[in-house]
Amino acid sequence: MVNFKDKTKYDFEDMLEIMRILRGENGCPWDREQTHESIRKNFIEEVYEACEAIDLKNDAMLCEELGDVLQQVVFHSQIAAEEGRFDIGDVCDGVCKKLVLRHPHIFGDVVAETSEQVLKNWDDIKMVEKNQRTYGDTINQVAKSLPALMYAEKVQKKAKKAGFDWPDVSGAFAKVDEEKAEIEQAMKGKGNVEEELGDLLFAVVNVARFLDVDPEEALFRASRKFADRFVKMEQLAGSLDGMTLEEMDKLWDKAKCE
């Protein structure tokens, strides 16, 4: 067996072998116990950490986090291989076939000179691949494990391809006002508050889509802005204990200006 401790440079084959060892008979007790379900959350966390590295434009961090994402891919593939279902070779084979099939303008004789044409071809081929015969099929196959705002945006984009969309952003804004009024009625006992709030959020995502704004990213940035200002407000106060809301509001306004 290779003495991995003494190696100075590792490659993809090393990663595969290390994972096989960790999952093997004399491997790591923790690694051997894991299943697809038990490390599902780890996979999500690693992807988000890679996204954070992209946002920070930190190459060293991105390199590390991409490695962690790749390790998760190898981990899941090894678990499946042990169960005789598929292995990392099948994973690579599948994605390569998909890339070749969905780029007929590169690997075939289809002409696509713009990004719009490329995406149109991609969607058409994807519908055939996944046996999607209707627009409803495309909506039903949007991953339900996506964050809610992202899921809403994708569902709306699928509906738009069927022509079911507002002519312009004014219709989306009007829907927000309508949903807001319905929440107010629900608060008076004339409806389901949770349902109406969901409708309002869905309507806001529609507005974001028309404005070409990523709602997930917009909400995250708004949340970070709030967090930063709250911290600044507390620093200005020294302590928030015993302060009234009016006093905190004054410090909040001051924090906004700094």
Image: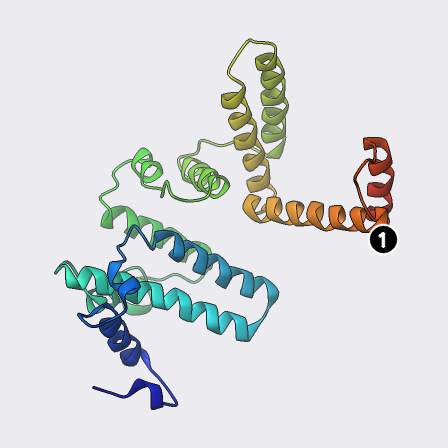
Which residue appears farthest toward the left when viewing the image? 84
Can you see residue 100?
no
Q: In front: 114, or 170?
A: 170
Please name the amino acid that badge 1 sits on: Glu
Tell me residue 142's x, y (percent). Answer: 36, 42
Tell me residue 150's x, y (percent). Answer: 48, 43
How does the figure colour the protein chain or chains? Answer: rainbow
Q: Is residue 51 above or below residue 1?
A: above
Label 1 secondary element: loop
Tell me residue 74's x, y (percent). Answer: 29, 67
- To which quarter of the image does residue 32 belong? bottom left
Residue carrying label 1: 258
- To which quarter of the image does residue 76 belong? bottom left
Q: Is residue 219 left or right of residue 14?
A: right
Residue at left offset 26%, top offset 55%:
35
- To which quarter of the image does residue 68 belong? bottom left
Q: Is residue 81 left or right of residue 120?
A: left
Residue at left offset 53%, top offset 71%:
61
Can you see residue 200?
yes
Residue at left offset 40%, top offset 64%:
69
